[in-house]
Image (tube, rainbow, N blue to C red):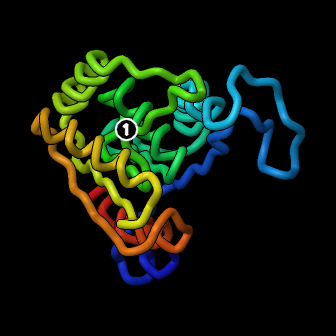
Amino acid sequence: MDYHKKSGEAKPMIVVMTNGNPGQAAAFPDSPKVATQGQGAGSMADGVFEESLVKDVVPYIESHFRVKANKENRAITGLSMGGHQTINTTLKNPGMFDYIGVMSMGFADFSQWGVDIDEKERDQKIEALKAADPELYWIACGEDDFLMESVVNMRKRLDEHNFDYEYFESAGGHTWNNWRVYLSMFAPRLFN
């Protein structure tokens, strides 16, 4: 993000990058596996990460670094499974983040890994997030992304609730090249 700093496009910020896979003690491949309940995507979609982010990570950052500890000065974004975790975190904690970015993910079906979604409860959470009125809810996906259907499902559901969001669709699929573009588009929009 050095380019944005030099050009004045992005505000100075602290970026915290966590390992969203509860099945790892630290960064792959530097750590042994730790015991988890789920298998496959389930271990990343079972809510353990989201709970730790809210109860452990955010309080740690706010108690150890000089930050503005309020919704208006917090952002969250994730790609792929991190996008799913971003969705879950913000639906469960609607007043915690004012800037939300969901990249290459939507309302996906994880039932094959034992993660079932109560649609009525999700609708209530969408309404609560809508009432919290985030400054920016930004969704991005590649037109050939294998998770595009989940993004279409999510946008349809958000539209049913008249939820305010922005959408960007790029060429290509589920790739680092797209995620670099999405991050370079999302970061300058934060805290303005």
Q: Nearer the viewer, residue 105 or 1?
A: 105
Q: Nearer the viewer, residue 7 or 108?
A: 108
Furthest residue in direction front, as rendered: 112
How many C-alpha atoms fall within 10 Å of the one at disc 1: few (<14), some, or many (≥20)? many
Q: Quadrant of residue 61?
A: top right
At a point 62% along the width and 37% down the height, the residue shown is 41
Tell me the amino acid under the disc marked 1: Phe
At a point 44% along the width and 82% down the height, the residue shown is 6
At a point 31% along the width and 28% down the height, the residue shown is 94
Residue 2 appears in the picture as rendered: yes
Q: Nearer the viewer, residue 7 or 186?
A: 186
Q: Residue at label 1?
A: 107
Q: Quadrant of residue 133?
A: top left
| Image vertical order of residue 191 relative to residue 185, above or below | above
Horizontal and vertical percent position of residue 28: 80, 50
Horizontal and vertical percent position of residue 26: 79, 42
Q: For this view, does 144 lie left or right of residue 49?
A: left
Residue 55 appears in the picture as rendered: no
How many labels were placed on the picture? 1
At a point 21% along the width and 56% down the height, the residue shown is 166
Horizontal and vertical percent position of residue 97: 35, 38
Quadrant in the picture for the C terminus: bottom left
| Image vertical order of residue 66 relative to residue 142, above or below | above
Horizontal and vertical percent position of residue 177: 52, 74
Query: What element does badge 1 sit on?
Result: loop
Furthest residue in direction left, as rendered: 162
Q: Quadrant of residue 20?
A: top right
